[in-house]
């Protein structure tokens, strides 16, 4: 009897009892995505080849940048293909391996999420220690999310002790870490915006922001002026649009802006106009720098060394919004775009 044994490690007897589930891009959205843009497919569990491992995904990352990849427009990340599986960060358990460095039972971080089972090139998988931190943390505060916040604040925005910092989308996975890091490193004042009163309360009462406001309550420019009467030195942008204009209005001479995301314009069907007050850059001589976390991987060891103890001690807090069931991943993504999450949005397979 052929048991389906892999070349080195693992057996496939279990594979006769289960199927794999994939989330595919069914069509490209025009404007706001809907559930009709996704397809859920049940398929046979794949078999790893030489140099590969088979991973049963446990947790999937859901991120705003995925909206851009649903479009065919040229960008920094390759568009998803219609009819093919979407992908993103994931943590899972190795079931089979053809590589000496990985064995069944190992927990790994990789980039082939949005499916229950993934065949991953071993060189693109990283072992993580579930005893050192919850596996979800490796997709959030100790993963690319945390590194984005760390690199964006310290390297791109060149934060200095005594700065006043404004963070848009501050209750999200990146923004919440940015604000806390700024406080821990000696910011004079940290201000955040969010979309609900509960999130605003969480920022000030739990995360230590000096001030926060609900951007739906009044014009952002007015609320930011009230929260930062002496202006801001650093702006960390996750939202764009009205928030960016307000930050330009309040930025001090030689201020710095890290432009990480612009979720407010991701569903636009026409290109957004530039900030109406952009000409202020001449008089204020502020700096705007776009950022991609991939440019800052060299900071990963320093980031982990510095931030992991802060997370372990509770000095740096994080929140997760976890949706159960891979079939609910499309709805979790739509909810993310609608601001339903606090902290990192994840799907537990």
Image (cartoon, helix red, strand yellow):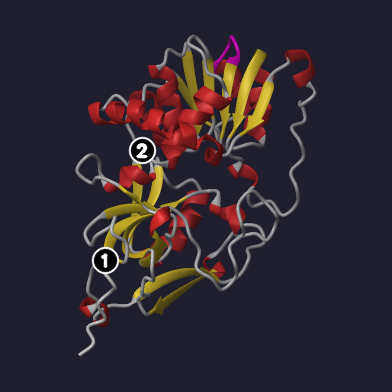
Q: Is residue 256 left or right of residue 126?
A: right
The C terminus, quarter of image: bottom left
Secondary-structure class at tag 1: strand
Which residue sits at x=46%, y=62%? 330
Residue 320 position (above or below residue 303)? below
Viewer-nearest residue: 7 or 114: 7
Counting every numbered tag in the picture gives 2
- Residue 327 drawn at (x, y percent): 39, 67
Residue 15 position (above or below residue 139)? below
Q: Is residue 3 left or right of residue 145?
A: left
C-alpha distance separating marks 2 and 1: 24 Å
Upstream in sequence: badge 2 or badge 1: 1
Q: Which residue is mark 2?
A: 142
Which residue sits at x=43%, y=70%? 22
Q: Which mark is residue 95?
A: 1
Q: Of helix, strand and loop, which mostly describes the magenta segment?
A: loop
Q: Which residues are magenta?
A: 227-232
């Amino acid at each position: 009897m052929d048991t389906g044994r892999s070349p080195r490690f693992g057996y496939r007897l279990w594979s006769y009892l289960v199927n794999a589930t994939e989330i595919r891009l069914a069509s490209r959205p025009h404007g706001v995505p809907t559930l009709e843009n996704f397809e859920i497919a049940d398929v046979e569990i794949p078999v790893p080849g030489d140099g590969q491992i088979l991973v049963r995904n446990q947790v999937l990352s859901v991120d705003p940048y995925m909206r851009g990849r649903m479009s065919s427009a040229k960008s920094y990340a390759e568009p998803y293909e219609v009819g093919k599986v979407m992908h993103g960060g994931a943590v899972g358990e190795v079931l089979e391996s053809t590589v000496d460095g990985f064995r069944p039972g190992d927990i790994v971080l990789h980039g082939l999420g949005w499916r229950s089972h993934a065949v991953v090139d071993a060189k693109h998988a990283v072992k993580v220690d579930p005893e050192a931190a919850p596996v979800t943390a490796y997709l959030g505060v100790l993963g690319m999310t945390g590194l984005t916040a760390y690199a964006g604040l310290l390297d791109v925005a060149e934060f200095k002790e005594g700065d006043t910092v404004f963070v848009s989308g501050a209750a999200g996975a990146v923004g919440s870490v940015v604000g806390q890091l700024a406080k821990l490193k000696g910011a004079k004042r940290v201000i955040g915006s969010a979309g609900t009163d509960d999130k605003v309360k969480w920022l000030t009462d739990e995360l230590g922001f000096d001030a926060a406001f609900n951007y739906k309550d009044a014009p952002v420019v007015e609320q930011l002026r009230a929260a930062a009467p002496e202006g801001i030195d650093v702006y960390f942008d996750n939202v764009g649009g009205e928030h960016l204009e307000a930050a330009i209005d309040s930025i001090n001479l030689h201020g710095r802006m890290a432009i990480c995301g612009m979720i407010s314009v991701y569903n636009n069907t026409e290109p957004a106009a530039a900030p109406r007050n952009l000409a202020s850059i001449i008089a204020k001589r502020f700096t705007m720098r776009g950022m991609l976390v991939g440019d800052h991987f060299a900071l990963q060891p320093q980031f982990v060394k510095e931030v992991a103890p802060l997370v372990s001690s509770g000095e740096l807090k994080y929140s997760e919004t976890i949706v159960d069931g891979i079939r609910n991943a499309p709805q979790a993504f739509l909810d993310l775009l609608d601001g339903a999450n606090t902290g990192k949005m994840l799907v537990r397979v």
